Image (cartoon, helix red, strand yellow):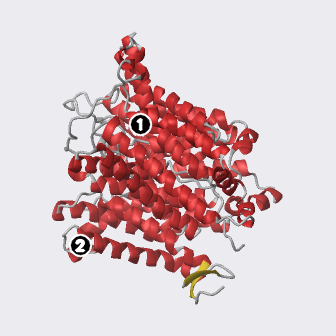
């Protein structure tokens, strides 16, 4: 029978091959799903893996969606490598967007272009502030960060909805729950005309470099990860676990808030109840599929962005619900977890004997 | 006085939803397994139950479908976590993310559907008592069922041999293994039972509690149920108490709105989540207290060979 046998040491090959195998598995299950639904599987695959790549404009849209995913995932990678389970990035994203939107709403026709910087910084601060609630409750009261950060997602959604239904509602907006459209001066600058790709993409790529240097070339980054891998060793080395907790949550909260600011002052241009688009949750998958490695996450963010765009196309062109994106995202994470078994174990055929 | 009777009735109803799921998670955690997939299992069960009632008209079949859906997802979780030794947090999270997506996907054609006329329950004679009647005796049978289940679970966990074995698997799997019990099999059964209970809770939401299907309608109740096991320091009776407490907080928002309290409805909706956070912080304040009560091997994988 097929048996699992522990490898003497983790397989370097499977560490990177496992996400690829997981993607293949997801595609196979996806083909099955299309067949069950009576849709042409080839056309389905085309929506997800070819349409988002086929023109310069499509590639731009791919980057527009990959940017927030990558920014959030970079922060989460620092968090998860420190063994801090922040799963409320969605909430930090929303509060970042709210804070950024609040600053953007202060602008008027005369406001200079400098306001963009304030908008972005407000986003970062908002995300950090929201994450620091989780950090403080964990630090001071030992409250489980998984549950607290997740509960705060619902609270953040309510804060946003309170504002857009109440004090920040556009008086000239026909009573729709949305803020005024932000002034042009608050817009995140775009890289080129004819595409929605903005400076956000450059910020995300700079974040990749920054995260790589921090994690693999600084003492602080090393201390952060030792605390995650071997808490006892970290204590012995004198690395503070409290500091690691705060660094992890402030980094991931700040990153999520930054993504929220880039989104609300970029493609969205106003606050609506639809600001939360699930990027904070999808970024968890991005982080894992990218092996918590800054460069790996570039690829997984693009992949996840393809899932989003593919889902939208499958809805408009094949009459499938857009939520198919969520199904594929979940399947990918499942397959990855299963395939990761091959990192620590090998499969062996053995005749059954006692 | 009548509004208060209805508030009590609504509290018991809302508490039942939370209690069913939290008791299922308690059984998991007593065996040493944390399943963060509660939210996803409940959502899939909610749509499975709802769709079944739409097609068959039978609430009982709806509950059965919900339990099956919950157990099925829990089975996948169990295979990964117990069979392949994957990380419990990450795998549970995967169940939740998948469940949110899959239920939205599967439920798309049921958004406008209506259930057949909802049955009305009342206990003869008792329901005629003024105040107490409408408060306590006009509930769905499961509201009473969950109380009976708590008593049965207490007896099972603390008064039977099988219950002792289950707890030993969560406290010290090595000892249970040495005594010849199959730790992994027991854990797998516990995971399935827990999933079925979360499923029952999910189906109760879409069939009885708010009889319709809306995307994401479980709205964090799975996560609140997870927090309840800590809040109750892993005791069945306290879970029931906690569930009613949180059910009360959920209902209070409607009551306050009814009284005309000038607070925005969004901030009131946030109340149960804020309450969960506050209670979690208060209960976790003393780490020793948690450590004494928590199953000692909670969240730790077990390999019989090592």
Q: Nearer the viewer, residue B79 or B267?
A: B79
What residue is drawn where x is 42% and y is 49%? B199
- Name the front one of labels 1 and 2: 1
Q: Position of residue B74 (x, y in %)?
A: 47, 58
Category of crowding for the residue at label 1, using alpha-carbon neighbours closer than 10 angstroms: few (below 14), some (14–19), many (at least 20): some
Tag 2 subunit:
A
Left or right? Give the position of A324 relative to B11: left
Q: In this figure, which residue is indicated by the disc labeled 1?
A: B142
Q: In this figure, which residue is indicated by the disc labeled 2?
A: A35
Label 1 with label 2: CB-CB less than 8 Å: no
Q: Position of residue B213 (x, y in %)?
A: 28, 44
- Where disc 2 sits, the SS reads helix
Q: Position of residue A116 (x, y in %)?
A: 41, 46
Q: Position of residue B102 (x, y in %)?
A: 34, 57
Q: Nearer the viewer, residue B145 or A133?
A: B145
Residue furthest to the front in view is B125
């Amino acid at each position: 029978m097929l048996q699992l046998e522990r490898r003497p040491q983790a397989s370097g090959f499977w560490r990177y091959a496992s996400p690829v195998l997981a993607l293949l598995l997801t595609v196979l299950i996806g083909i099955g799903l299309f067949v069950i639904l009576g849709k042409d599987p080839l056309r389905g695959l085309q929506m997800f893996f070819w349409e988002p790549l086929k023109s310069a404009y499509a590639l731009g849209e791919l980057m527009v969606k990959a940017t927030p995913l990558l920014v959030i995932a970079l922060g989460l990678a620092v968090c998860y490598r420190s063994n801090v389970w922040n799963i409320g990035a969605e909430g930090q994203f929303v509060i970042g967007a709210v804070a950024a939107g609040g600053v953007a709403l202060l602008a008027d026709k005369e406001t200079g272009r400098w306001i963009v910087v304030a908008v972005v910084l407000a986003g970062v601060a908002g995300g950090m502030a929201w994450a620091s609630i989780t950090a403080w409750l964990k630090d001071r009261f030992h409250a489980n960060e998984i549950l607290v950060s997740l509960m705060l997602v619902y609270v953040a959604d309510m804060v946003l909805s309170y504002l857009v239904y109440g004090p920040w509602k556009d008086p000239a907006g026909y009573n729709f729950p949305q803020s005024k459209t932000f002034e042009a001066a608050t817009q995140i600058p775009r890289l080129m005309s004819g595409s929605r790709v903005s400076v956000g993409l450059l910020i995300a790529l700079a974040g990749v470099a920054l995260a790589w240097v921090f994690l693999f070339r600084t003492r602080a980054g090393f201390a952060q990860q030792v605390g995650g891998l071997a808490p006892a060793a970290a204590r012995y080395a004198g690395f503070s676990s409290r500091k690691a907790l705060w660094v992890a949550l402030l980094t991931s909260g700040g990153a999520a808030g930054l993504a929220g600011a880039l989104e609300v002052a970029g493609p969205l241009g106003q606050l609506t109840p639809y600001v939360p688009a699930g990027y904070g949750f999808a970024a968890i998958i991005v982080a894992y599929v990218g092996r918590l490695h800054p460069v790996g996450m570039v690829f997984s963010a693009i992949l996840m962005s393809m899932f989003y765009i593919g889902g939208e196309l499958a809805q408009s062109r094949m009459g499938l619900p857009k939520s198919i994106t969520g199904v594929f995202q979940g399947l990918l994470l499942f397959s990855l977890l299963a395939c990761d078994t091959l990192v620590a174990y090998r499969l062996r055929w053995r005749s059954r004997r006692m | 006085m009548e509004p208060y009777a209805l508030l009590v009735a609504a509290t018991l109803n809302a508490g039942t939803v939370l209690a069913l799921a939290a008791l299922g998670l308690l059984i998991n955690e007593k065996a040493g397994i944390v399943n963060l997939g509660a939210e996803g299992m409940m959502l899939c069960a909610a749509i499975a139950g709802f769709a079944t009632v739409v097609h068959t008209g039978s609430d009982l079949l709806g509950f059965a479908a919900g339990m099956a859906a919950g157990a099925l997802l829990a089975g996948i979780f169990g295979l990964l976590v117990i069979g392949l030794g994957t990380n419990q947090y990450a795998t549970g999270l995967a169940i939740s993310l998948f469940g949110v997506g899959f239920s939205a996907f599967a439920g798309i054609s049921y958004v406008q559907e209506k259930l057949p006329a909802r049955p009305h329950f009342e206990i003869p004679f008792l329901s005629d008592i003024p105040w107490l009647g409408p408060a306590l005796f006009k509930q769905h049978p499961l509201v009473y069922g969950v109380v009976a289940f708590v008593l049965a679970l207490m007896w099972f966990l603390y008064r039977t041999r099988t219950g002792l074995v289950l707890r030993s698997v969560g406290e010290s799997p090595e000892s249970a293994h040495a005594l010849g019990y199959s730790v992994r099999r027991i854990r797998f059964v516990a995971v399935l039972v827990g999933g079925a209970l979360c499923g029952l809770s999910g189906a109760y939401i879409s069939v009885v509690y708010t009889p319709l299907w809306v995307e994401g309608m479980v709205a964090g109740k799975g996560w609140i149920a997870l927090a309840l096991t800590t809040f109750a320091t892993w005791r069945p009776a306290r879970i029931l108490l906690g569930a009613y407490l949180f059910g009360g907080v959920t209902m209070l928002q409607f009551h306050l709105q009814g009284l005309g309290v000038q607070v925005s409805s969004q901030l009131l909706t946030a109340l149960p989540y804020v309450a969960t956070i506050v209670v979690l912080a208060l209960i976790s304040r003393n780490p020793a207290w948690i450590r004494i009560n928590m199953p000692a091997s909670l969240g730790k994988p077990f390999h019989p060979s090592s």
